[in-house]
Image (cartoon, rainbow, N blue to C red):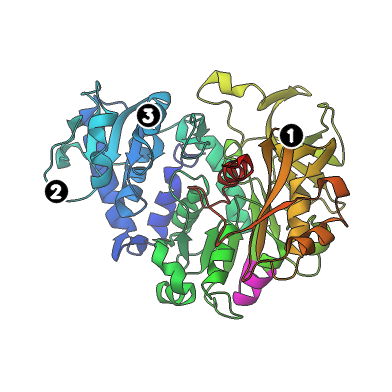
Amino acid sequence: MDVADHALYARFLRGLARAPERPAARADGQTVTYAEAHRTALLRAGSLLHAAGGELQAVGVLAAKGIPAYQGILTALCAGAAVVPLRPDFPAARTAEMMRAAGVTAVIADAEGRRLLPELLAGLPDTAVLAAEDHPAPEHTAGRPVTVDERHALVAPRPVDPDDTAYVLFTSGSTGRPKGVPLSHGNFAHYFQVLDTRYDFTPEDVFTQTFDLNFDCSLFDLFSAWGAGASVTVLPPHAYRDLPAHLTEQGVTVWFSTPSSIALVRRLGGLRPGSLPTLRWSLFAGEALKCSDTEEWQHAAPASFVENLYGPTELTVTVTAHRWSPQTSPVVGANGVVPIGPLHKGLDHVLLDPDGRPDPAVGELCVTGPQMASRYLDPADDHGRFLDHDGRRWYRTGDRVRLAPGGDLVYLGRMDAQVQVQGWRVELAEVDHALQLCEGVDEAVTVGATTAAGIELVVFYTAPAPVPPARFAALLRTTLPDGVVPRHYHRIAELPLNSNRKTDRRALTARADELLAGP
């Protein structure tokens, strides 16, 4: 194997060889070709290495999604450093903790990111800072500014080993202590070999980027496109107002988002039959994908294969895929949710019952193989998530699944999504599914609220008009014991989404606690 074949930046080099003058990325009315991005990355990587004394461990890319951020990612990889994506809109204290944990010694920042640097780099005046834009505005900032100089340009990316860290991603949301996951070039090499076998991406494809760059699924978009010589185009928030027109204008052929985006597109009138004719692939990941949503999306994108992907960050983006079939997927799935599919080639799994014993049919999904991160940045975080079993190390996903006869894994819910109400173990996913069968309901989420009397179930739902609680209760009594049927139903305009555009159950639970706490 050539030294560059296992490197994550080899994906870009492959695209460069296939389509040097085609757009590598498009955003905000701007375009950068593969050849332009390559020249810029080698120039900036060399200048950054010179300023850092020749070696870099980790580079923070503190920039909003767009061409400057993409250039920053490629620059860091060409310098042989690990990319640490950082969001300028996150709390500065959280970002500083991530930088410290990842060992960031240089930052590539856009204008918004540079405004945070005085606070982030307080006491770290020697941190190298490179502007992400080609022509940044003169400004006072913190750190040690890097001057881009042609004399220091690299002729090729720095060599890396398969075990070297390519990316450091943090798994918690926008609040709470971040948990760092180092993913190696070898992890990504296996992952993209699987994707290259499964998908037929070409230089003519145009990928959306709906995910923010700190979300692992953004790597699927970026490096699948770059490996094919295709283009990535940032989806601006306003595009959802008329998604069909935007995708047609941009010539988008590959869509990838969380399932929550389907409800948003539906609300804004974009899911008419045949309304998304340019799509060849429609991919969803990040949370449970409902069969009803999938069927509606498929009718809107009739020329598209629709797939449900699954995988935690610790296993390098995704580890399973299920291709939607209206005949078989609803039969194999559970609770109205599309199956997540079989594991990628080269990976292995074991299911554990609540007592930690292997179960051949149902249990917590544990996975091992070449996509598994070896550890967290903080060894204290390893406990309870990594498991030694049968002479191998496994990652415990915390997800409960069932193995279907054909080999598909069927998602049943989070292990911690079971709540105990008056002595009964209640699966929240089952309650949600039953609620969504209620006439007039668009979406419904059930959470457990803590009260002085114990846990009570609270339902939040979206619907064109209020639904009488008695109608909900009558439906749920066919599923739940009478004593645990929810008594609290709250209609809301839309379900809240977290920073990764997943349904924010934490926010709903906090709201339920407040509602039941009373004045």
Contact between marks 2 and 1 (CB within 8 A): the answer is no
Q: Nearer the viewer, residue 455 or 98?
A: 455
Q: Which residues are magenta?
A: 295-305
Choose between 408 and 489: the one closer to the eye. Answer: 489
What residue is pinned by disc 2? 137
Is 76 placed left or right of 471 in the picture?
A: left
Q: Residue furthest front?
A: 519
The amino acid on which the numbered mark 1 sits, given as a three-letter code, is: Gly
| First along the sequence among labels 2 and 1 | 2
Query: Number of marks in the image?
Result: 3
| Pointer 3 or 2: first along the chain | 3
Q: Is residue 279 visible?
A: yes
Q: Which residue is mark 1?
A: 454
Q: Residue at x 53, y 41 (%)?
A: 188
- Report the residue marked by disc 3: 99
The answer for how far apart the CA atoms under marks 2 and 1 are is: 57 Å
